[in-house]
Image (cartoon, rainbow, N blue to C red):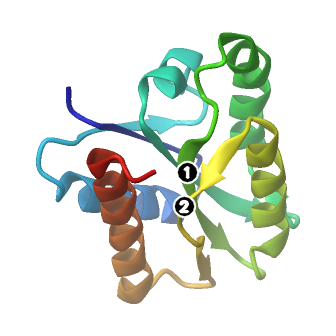
Amino acid sequence: MACSILVVYHSQGGNTRKMAEAVVAGAREVEGVHVVLRDAFRATLADLIECDGLALGSPEYFGYMAGMVKDFFDRTYEPARREKRVFKKPYAVFISAGNDGRGALAAIERICIGYPFKKVYEAVIARGELTEKILAECRELGQTLAAGCDAGIY
């Protein structure tokens, strides 16, 4: 069975969506890996349970993650905990920040500890304008997450 990567994100201005698409492109470079891209509002518990690895993307709002990303966590945490099927699931984070992104990252990582997920890649944070360098880092994040999951090292 092929490895599956879930990319959950929220975007209003479009930058986080572009980052998510770059993560997806990188993950798809690993042959045989199935990649699912979901807006946080539409992402479900089933998506979370069925994936082998998770990439989470959020803009930074007021030094915090987007409310829709928090909503995804709120909707899935208790049922996922009861299912006991997300334990130590590998994850990585990407953030589009107008400021420094540290508050959004800290909030996401704190919640991921509670699931518990396993951080397998340092966060990609776009501070200010989205550059090709940042998009390349997002592709690398997706490729690394997918390759590690596919190889069974996470």
- Numbered disc 1: secondary structure: strand
Identified at 58% across, 18% down, the residue is: 45
Q: Nearer the viewer, residue 32 or 124?
A: 32
Spatial CA span between label 1 and label 2: 6 Å
Identified at 46% across, 55% down, the residue is: 17
Q: Are marks 1 and 2 in contact (CB under 8 Å)?
A: yes
Identified at 30% across, 63% down, the residue is: 143
Work out whether residue 21 can be spotted. Answer: no
Q: Nearer the viewer, residue 84 or 33?
A: 84
- In which quadrant of the rendered view does residue 44 lie? top right
Q: Residues within 10 Å of mark 2 (few under 14, many from 20)?
A: some
Identified at 34% across, 46% down, the residue is: 152
Tell me the residue that label 2 is attached to.
Answer: 120
Counting from the top left corner in percent of width and height, residue 153 is at: 39, 53
Q: Which mark is residue 91?
A: 1
- In which quadrant of the rendered view does residue 129 lie? bottom right
Residue 30, compared with residue 82, is above or below; it is below
Indicate the amino acid at tag 1.
Answer: Tyr
Indicate the amino acid at tag 2.
Answer: Val
Counting from the top left corner in percent of width and height, residue 64 is at: 84, 59
Counting from the top left corner in percent of width and height, residue 145 is at: 40, 57
For the N terminus, give its image quadrant.
Answer: top left
